[in-house]
Image (cartoon, rainbow, N blue to C red):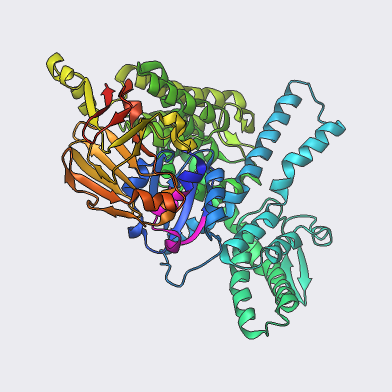
Amino acid sequence: MSNQNIAKEIVHLVGGEQNISSLVHCATRLRFNLKDNKLADKENLKKLSGILGVVESGGQFQIVIGSHVSEVYKEISKTTNTDASEKSPNEKKGNIGALIFEVISRSFSPLLGALAGAGMLKALLTILTMTGILSAESGTYFILSAAGNAVFYFLPIFLGITISTKFGANPYVGGAIGAALLEPNFTSLVNNSGDVSHFLGIPVVLMDYSSSVFPIFIAISIYAVLDRFLKKIIHKDIQMFLVPMLSLVIIVPLTVIAFGPFGVTLGNLIGQGIGFLASQSGTLTGAIMGGAFTFLTLLGLHWGLTPIVLANLAGDGDPLLAMASAAIFAQIGVSFGVLLKTKDKNLKTLAGSMLLPGALSGVTEPIIYGLVLRYKRTLPYIAVSGAVGGAIVGLVGAKAISFSFPSFLGIPAFSPMGLYTIAILISFACATILIVVLGYEDKQKNVEANKTESEQQSLKQEVILSPLTGVIKLLADVEDEAFATEAMGKGISIEPTVGKAVSPVNGVVTTVFRTGHAIGITSDKGAELLIHIGINTVKLKGKYFSPVVKEGDRVIQGDLLVNFDIEKIKEAGYLVTTPIIITNSSSYTDVIDTNKETVQEKDDLLTLII
């Protein structure tokens, strides 16, 4: 299915544009704030081609897409108003924990690419200098180092922009507040952290705010409240210059007097707390972190650790990211184990396609939602393998020395590199071996696999009848790329001559699009069918379609599903060519089309071979 079609279906299934308060995306997920989560069709979203999973967490409705999430986000943005700062008066406020995770997620999401790219560049420079290919004293090194360090050094500016955007305040004033903490006249006052200067006679404890996280979060949170207050009391004709000026005059001094030192102290205390736990029992801390991180990712809460990681990196390194790496490599190991173990060509292809992005970039959510949740037996394998690797990381005291998504290419971002590599390879190997030795399929699936030969024979094929009367047309000739390329599944199409569609199978109606132009049915034998009447007929918004069934209805072959007016649809400028798609065709070894040129309703149309 094309990104455009995925975007349209997502908007429809989350309850329409009117149910969307705001939308942002991170590395792999669309993160919706919906006015009413109950209006979203979670089950049909999960079944939609191109979606790996659906999660409700932290007050958000999250749809896992994969590495091309930004393309789907762009398509949604073209046709809907998805302003990330928009707030609906009806929008429910979550608890304080959910709000904090939401703010962190939305603040860091736009920066992930820059942070990951800069982290990988710093890792590459480490390799080049260690191998002697590049001198750490050369101009080339300093220029590339500047490119790698900039986003981290100026992090308060970037966060000032993204946090302000999240709160609906002026993002450039937010950026200016962050920039003030790094301005040369101010930084020249700081000889040593903890030195004291004065502002209007008030003592100011001077701090180094480069790469800091917590001070700017506190400052911009207060600025957002102040911005709304000033706009209420200042006449709109002078707001353009007076609100920013007063915001800077008030917030910057407050930040260096109070918010900044408090934020730095808070970050240091958290770092010291983690360091204390690691010093008391690095093995236990690492085991907990490595075992639990996958479950944090499932809930979409893993980005809540990012401020802590970055704050630690501004010091002498971060143990959390190193410990969490064990879980990432355990997930990669599961994908590799399935690739080795399975004899199913489709599953082997799927595992291989998910293995490479995880191994090279550290983006493993496709593995989690495409394999792990599909074969839930692998979850304890990952937990155990992650705990083992994390325990070793904690035991040897490995730390991240620059920000990088854990992957094979990101290994130089951790120190000591050799011991860290051993730890994550053990985690990877444990998961792989557990899959190969113990298998990945659930017990129930193994029971199904051990059915008698006669039972299996009865499942060898399923015949799908024609839901329409009309002329057969090859799917490749349909004037819609999503159908013609079989992106949605294999099948056939019909040019109907009678304006009614009947059920081609005995089964249950799983989807009735509100426009009436498409119906999904799951047969008693497991075939998932989509009958899509016409091309782009969703734009008719239900005109000329009269469904007579609803979701959940039980149907038998020949039961009427929908009436439609062929001539009116054509007069409106739309084709009535109707694809009949087996959306789970990957579950079958072959889908055989009829050899007829025309069909009557209830004629044999497709044969599914298991």
Most foreground residue, 83 or 580: 580
Q: Position of residue 132 (x, y in %)?
A: 78, 21
Residue 240 seen in the current view: yes
Q: Which residue occupies the foreground of this view, 439 or 528?
A: 528
Q: Position of residue 566 (x, y in %)?
A: 35, 48
Q: Residue at x 57, y 32 (%)?
A: 361
Numbered range of the magenta stretch: 8-23
Where is 164 relative to 444, above or below? below
Give the residue drawn at x 47%, y 41%: 65
Q: Is residue 76 above or below residue 65?
A: below
Quarter of the image for the C terminus: give it.
top left
Q: Quadrant of residue 607?
A: top left
Residue 225: x percent and y percent?
A: 58, 73
Q: Is residue 568 above or below residue 115?
A: below
Front-most of residues 290 and 42: 42
- The answer to whether residue 105 is visible is no
In this rendered view, identify the residue nearer to me: 525 or 493.
493
In the figure, residue 575 lies in which quadrant? top left
Q: Is residue 18 magenta?
A: yes
Q: Quadrant of residue 174?
A: bottom right
Q: Residue 103: say if magenta.
A: no
- Give percent across and percent down for residue 123: 67, 32
In this figure, what is the number of numbered marks?
A: 0
Classify residue 298 as left or right of residue 303. left
Residue found at the far right of this picture: 139
